[in-house]
Image (spheres, rainbow, N blue to C red):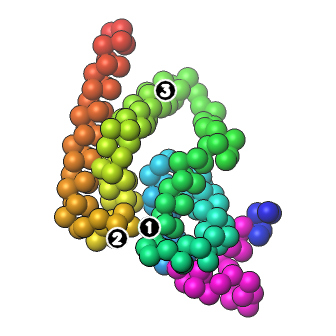
Amino acid sequence: MTEANRDALVHPDPRNRSLPQEFEAFFELKQLGYLRYAHTHLRSMEDARRAVKVAGLRLVLQWSSILGRPDYEAEALRIVREVVRNYWQLNADGLVLPPVGQDQAAQQIALLARRKAVDRAWEELELVAPEHADCLRLRTARLSYVEVAQALGITTAQARQGTWMGMRTLRDLLDRTTDQHDKRTPK
């Protein structure tokens, strides 16, 4: 599929009704939330846009079966999360840093080390408490507790508790990861 066709999927021309109207309305409503979610995972808005386009393509291809499910919004979010989690396998671009001078290089290395620590903490959180990680990711994507609860098929109280527990666990994991890194780094 060409980039122009993918753009037509995300920004459909109203004169061209090749996509189901229900899908267009649904995707228009949810696209910003999906983009926020993808951006929390992928660190680059351009990568997030690409992931949402791929997810949109998968959603439209499976639209009739998604609508047949009792909670079609949760199923759509599951597909989006799957695309985002597998984005780097789908897109072999990898991480490219812009060329910098010597002074900025040290700053970027420190920033990347911090990002790696955060990424490792998120990965560990997803292993030890995946439901808390999901709540926290959706909240960091600026979804309300009600929206998080609807997307995950849980109560609003469980969404609040899962977010709080996820944040507490993530902080603990990040502190532990940072402490371990500090012990290995010579002063």
Question: Which of the two discs, 3 and 2, sits closer to the camera?
Answer: 2
CA neighbours of label 2 inside 10 A, class few (<14), some (14 to 19), many (20+): some
Distance between mark 3 and mark 2 Cα atoms: 39 Å
20 within the magenta span: yes
Q: Is residue 150 left or right of residue 164?
A: right
Q: Mark 1 or mark 3: which comes first in sequence? A: 1
CA neighbours of label 1 inside 10 A, class few (<14), some (14 to 19), many (20+): some
Q: Residues in magenta?
A: 6-26
Please name the residue shown 24% across and 34% down the image: 172
12, 150: nearer the viewer: 150
112, 130: nearer the viewer: 130
Residue 78 visible in the picture: yes
Distance between mark 1 and mark 2 Cα atoms: 7 Å
Task: Tell me the kind of residue under disc 3.
Answer: Ile
Residue ID for mark 2: 150
99, 49: nearer the viewer: 49
Please name the residue shown 33% across and 51% down the image: 131
Query: Where residue 64 sits in the image (x, y, percent)?
Result: 61, 77
Task: Tell me the kind of residue under disc 2.
Answer: Gln
CA neighbours of label 3 inside 10 A, class few (<14), some (14 to 19), many (20+): few
Q: Mark 1 or mark 2: which comes first in sequence? A: 1
Q: Quadrant of residue 154?
A: bottom left
Q: Are marks 1 and 2 in contact (CB under 8 Å)?
A: yes
Residue ID for mark 3: 109
Question: Which of the two discs, 1 and 3, sits closer to the camera?
Answer: 1
Furthest toward the right, the residue is 2
Residue 140 visible in the picture: no
Please tell me whether mark 2 sits on a helix, a strand or a loop: helix
Please tell me whether mark 3 sits on a helix, a strand or a loop: helix
Please name the residue shown 60% across and 81% down the image: 24
Q: Is residue 73 left or right of residue 9?
A: left
